[in-house]
Image (spheres, grey):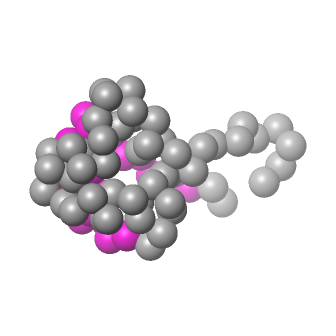
Amino acid sequence: MSADQPVRPLFGEVIREARKKRGWSQEELGQAAGLSRPTIARVEADSDVTTATIGKIARALGLTLELTDRG
């Protein structure tokens, strides 16, 4: 990464902040997304998760996903 590129937060940080902004616990987000609380914890810890899981969480939080080419 070059010095002129902004530092982007990690995916898990974005999810955690969006969840907290809504006043939700990990359990509540899990219920809204149809996932378990441990799965939410893994996402927030930036562990490997499936794209299906990412999509469910994004929908539950009202977030959009953006793919960018960093090349």
Give the image location of residue 18, x and y in percent: 39, 34
Does the stretch in magenta take in 68? yes
Mark yes or no: residue 19 visible.
Answer: yes
Residue closer to the observer: 25 or 11: 25
Compared with 35, 22 (above or below) is: above
Image quarter of residue 52: bottom left
Residue closer to the observer: 1 or 60: 60
Compared with 70, 59 (above or below) is: above
Left or right: 18 with respect to 71?
left
The residue shown at (70%, 42%) is 7
Compared with 58, 40 (above or below) is: below
Image quarter of residue 53: bottom left
Mark yes or no: residue 59 visible.
Answer: no
The residue shown at (24%, 50%) is 27
Give the image location of residue 56, x and y in percent: 21, 54
The residue shown at (21%, 44%) is 28
Q: Quadrant of the N terminus?
A: bottom right
Left or right: 13 with respect to 61?
right
Count the marks: 0
State which region is magenta: 49-69
Residue closer to the observer: 68 or 35: 35
Left or right: 2 with respect to 57?
right
The residue shown at (33%, 57%) is 40
Q: Quadrant of the C terminus?
A: bottom right
Does the stretch in magenta take in 58? yes
